[in-house]
Amino acid sequence: MPAMNIRPSAAIRQNYNEIADLCRKTAEPVFLTKNGRGRYAIVDMEEYEKTKAIIKLMGELSKGEQSGKEKGWTDFAEVEKMLGVTNG
């Protein structure tokens, strides 16, 4: 696990380039503190978008699992038939 990048919130004004480089190089968030307590997390936009996509996917998978538990599962052969895929 990489070391956490923790900076005071005033550092964003003073060290923008350093913080931006940390986000790009490590693909890890840089945590900013205010009055010595964790307050913000700065992440590279690409990493943020990936995280959002993963959260959305996990939510959809959870819905599918719940549906399978409530309504029953569809057999793989039936899915192939519904999709017009032949086994061959």
Image: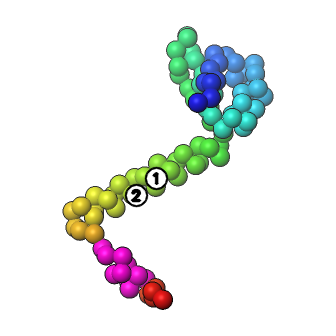
Q: Amino acid at mark 2?
A: Glu
| Residue 23 at x, y percent in the picture | 69, 34
Q: Residue at x 28, y 58 (%)?
A: 66
- Residue 3, by quadrant, is top right
Q: Amino acid at mark 1?
A: Lys
The foreground one among 58 and 81 is 81
Q: Quadrant of the N terminus?
A: top right
Left or right? Give the position of 48 relative to 71.
right
Residue 56's disc number: 1
Q: Is residue 88 above or below residue 14?
A: below
Q: Is residue 2 above or below residue 57?
A: above
Q: How many marks?
A: 2
| Residue 37 at x, y percent in the picture | 52, 14
Which range of residues does the magenta coloring cover? 74-83
**3D distance between C-alphas at marks 2 and 1:** 6 Å
Q: Is residue 4 above or below residue 54?
A: above
| Residue 69 at x, y percent in the picture | 24, 61
Q: Are marks 2 and 1 in contact (CB under 8 Å)?
A: yes
The foreground one among 1 and 68 is 1
- Residue 72, by quadrant, is bottom left
Answer yes or no: is residue 20 visible: no
Answer yes or no: is residue 79 visible: yes
Residue at disc 1, secondary structure: helix
**Tag 2 residue:** 60
Does the magenta-highlighted stretch encompass residue 18?
Answer: no
Residue at disc 2, secondary structure: helix
Q: Residue at x 61, y 32 (%)?
A: 29
Task: Give the residue furthest to the left.
Answer: 70
Q: Residue at x 78, y 28 (%)?
A: 17
